[in-house]
Amino acid sequence: MIRPPLKHLRVPIAALGLLLGAAFAAPASAAAATPASHSAVPAVTIQQPTLVTMPTGQVVGLSHVTPDSKSHTYTFKVSAPASECASLAKAYPKLKAGKSCENTETIYVGPKQMHIRKATAYAPATVWYTAVTSDEQCSVLYRCTGWHQSVSAQFEFNGGWVANDYLDCNDSGGIFYVVSVTWCGTWNNGATIASGGKMNAGDDFNISAVVKSIPIGGSHATRIWCTVDGQLSYTTPY
């Protein structure tokens, strides 16, 4: 495995609430980072991790996560899909739509590692970096016991390009739900500054259950974004 088990790392980050200012305020746009050459240390504009919100106030992810020399874990609530909340409300009348209908998301970011290829008679020295990360979503009810689904990935980057060289979408399950991964892959893998400067890796999955003879289900997605200078963002589009 490229990451420690999340159950040993799940630590809530109350500090994220302070980063929002006003409740569920939209995150500020990231300042432009200065790309480095293929043989230089990437220059990254350091920003604090910030919750990603929709205009309606729904939390859908985390942005501005910059790997450093230590590992970090972030745990927060994300809005569940409206269709899932509606079916849950039928089975559990006390569970109201809105803030009470939220899944738990836990993000792990490993230390950034530097790699150096020495110069030869045919090529100059090259420096690049790797970062491992995972993004786990867990159910509104019973947290990860009800259902859980995790994406683990490793990215390589050097300021000029970014690529995914490891992706695992198979860590899923639950005792009340069936979790079905319908897609696992990447977008813009091997991105350069000219091709947009960022890529993503992730999956699409469905969850389903029957509670009190009421079918409960929803479609989910996980996307882990990485830029050429190694800045990470996480979104749960649906």
Image (spheres, grey):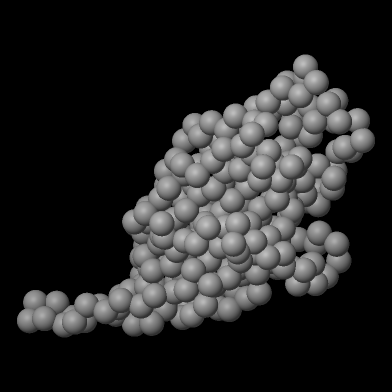
Q: Is residue 19 visible?
A: no
On the rendered image, what quadrant is the N terminus found in?
bottom left
Task: Residue at 67% x, 42% y: name it.
Answer: 145
The mark tally for this picture is: 0
Q: Residue furthest left?
A: 121
Please tell me which residue lies in front, 179 or 22.
179
Q: Residue furthest right?
A: 94
Task: Residue at 60% x, 64% y: name it.
Answer: 9
Q: Is residue 134 left or right of residue 15?
A: left
Residue 90 percent location from the top left of the image: 85, 25
Residue 8 percent location from the top left of the image: 59, 62
Q: Is residue 84 visible?
A: yes
Please tell me which residue lies in front, 78 or 50.
78
On the rendered image, what quadrant is the C terminus found in?
top right
Q: Is residue 20 left or right of residue 132?
A: right
Task: Residue at 64% x, 39% y: name it.
Answer: 147
Residue 53 percent location from the top left of the image: 73, 55
Task: Residue at 57% x, 33% y: name it.
Answer: 179
Q: Quadrant of residue 64?
A: bottom right
